[in-house]
Image (tube, rainbow, N blue to C red):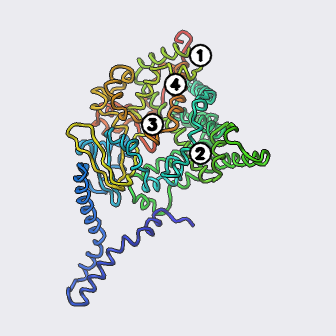
Amino acid sequence: MQLSPGVRYLLRHTHPLIAPSVVVYLTIKALDSFGITECPTWALVIATVLAKPLLLVFQAKHANRKNERLAVAQGAVLPPLVKDSPWTIIAKAQKSIESGYPADNLFEWTQEYGNSYRFNLFTAKFFVTLEPDHVKAILATQFDSFVKGPMFLSQMDTLLGSGVFNADGEMWKFHRAMTRPFFTRERISDFEIYERNCDTSLSQARVRLTEGYPVEFQDLVSRFTLDSATEFLFGESVGSLCAGIAYPPSAAHKTPASFYNHPSRVFAEAFTVGQETVAKRFAFGNEWQLAEFFGDKIRPFRNVMDNFTRPLMKAALEKRERELREKGEIDEKKDEESNLLAHLVKHTQDEKILQDELVNLLVAGRDTTMSLLTFSMYMLTQHPDIERRLREEIFEKVGPRGVPTYQSMRDMKYVRAFLNEVLRLYPPVPVDSRTTVNNVVLPSKKYGQDPLFVSKGTTSIYSVLYMHRRTDLWGPDALTFDPDRFLDERLHKYLTPNPFIFCPFNAGPRICLGQQFAYHEATFYLVRLLQNFTNFTLDEAANIKPPEHWKLGDSLVREEKIHPMAHLTMYVKGGLWVHMKELNSSEA
């Protein structure tokens, strides 16, 4: 029988939790027995109960003084310490997850403590930064001093297992080496996968629009990216687009049962809820297991996902066994695999490793590009002038009916600038973290700003979302959506001399392997979309409006027309319902 997370936590921590109380109790009773003291029962109870909390306070203060001395010895200082209690920190994190702007709890503290600060959450230490110099150190120049860390690995284990995004050390190197060869230019430029699924996707949209209803674009592109990712990974699509697309809430009764019961929807729903549950774990730090005392809340969803991937994995393993029996051996260099799974089974036959890796790659293959395309559409609804410029370039480089090629994608500079601007203001992964494996000093290039000392075992959080929106890094118009900033003099003024101010795909040794895959897929879909449709507008009735308290935020937050949220990746709460008109021959 598998124990619940909460029970495992208590069993692991019982001794350190009760040891101080036992020592205090026995010490006081011994002193009483020798007549040295005469402690009343009520005082004995209080001293016993408070022993562990007081010890934690003492240990925290002692560690702080020790770190202050170590920092001074290295010419550094400690980051400012957030004064809020652990309970307040948890409450703010939960509010942010449920109704806040993505990671607004982290941004709120920058108003008081600056762009780098630290806080404590029971047994965990955290450091938060929006500084590109620190992000550069974390991801690249001091890469060996930072790992995912035991807390992150435990929080993500049920969902991602030991896959490439949830592994450190040799296991991460193994996954990276195993998958990298498949992400070659030739592989990621196989546009036939995109074309098939894109055309099916837009056909579904055309049918719904003809009926006079808006299209839920986020769901539409999530199906496109899921079908494309599974075809690339497994050699066959899950066919989620075949299930059709939903009607808006006002006509929900018209959505057939087959839409909800399609196997791909069951898989996708488990996928999404699993990620939402993981996000809630982050709010509790090391103590997340106590919030799931009676059972692992993610396990049932991971089981659904495994039920889907397991037959595909077993089929790939059986195929490998047949090839071994027929050929006697498999030449990994000569045999050309048609999909990533066929490639992976030549490197490992461990079923858990394979299933974990497939789930990890599906998160990357579906959700990140879905997020990019969703917020691209949102920006098209807000900027018709940009839509016109994009179409002009597409028609010039590809034509009104042509199919994008690798070269034409390279030639479409404004399309790439548009996607980069979406990635800047709405990065698919708005927040990420690493954990220090030793004491580190993070440098600063800013005049008058001291280097920061971060102690061993500290979870170091960096938010590219808010770093991408800093006016001192991107200029006074940083909160304005303007693709030209990636083409005009602002590129050379801000980004060229300081490239780490833009990290939508991370950087360094763990930079996203699928970066070009995502650019190609998003570009292909955008081209096809603008070749076929125009006049993109939001449906006022179907879209969920932002909360009233967002009107107190910065200019970009105040002007939001939809409700961005984040679990592992950014998405729109309730979906993105849009109207669009088919492009007629005169407009083409």
Q: Earlier in the sequence, mark 4 or mark 2?
A: 2
Q: How far across and down, in percent of the image, does residue 575 sit?
A: 48, 36
**Quadrant location, the C terminus:** top right
The answer to whether 156 is drawn above or below residue 50 in the figure is above
Residue at which label 1 appears: 401
Asked if labels 2 and 4 touch by Cβ distance under 8 angstroms, the answer is: no
Q: Residue furthest top?
A: 586
Q: How far across and down, in percent of the image, does residue 28 sit?
A: 26, 82
Horizontal relation, residue 393 to residue 434: left or right: right
Q: Residue furthest bottom?
A: 34
Residue at which label 3 appears: 505
Alpha carbon distance from label 1 to label 3 = 31 Å
Alpha carbon distance from label 2 to label 1 = 35 Å
Which of discs 1 and 3 lies nearer the camera? The answer is 3
Which of discs 4 and 2 lies nearer the camera? The answer is 4
Horizontal relation, residue 314 to residue 119: left or right: right
Q: Residue at x 48, y 52 (%)?
A: 169
Alpha carbon distance from label 4 to label 2 = 27 Å
23 or 277: nearer the viewer = 23
Alpha carbon distance from label 1 to label 4 = 13 Å
Label 3: how many residues lie within 10 Å, few (<14), some (14-19) or many (20+)? some
75 or 28: nearer the viewer = 75
| Secondary element at tag 4 | helix
Alpha carbon distance from label 2 to label 3 = 29 Å
| Secondary element at tag 1 | loop
Three-letter code, disc 2: Val
Q: Which mark is residue 543?
A: none
- Residue 334 can be seen in this image: yes
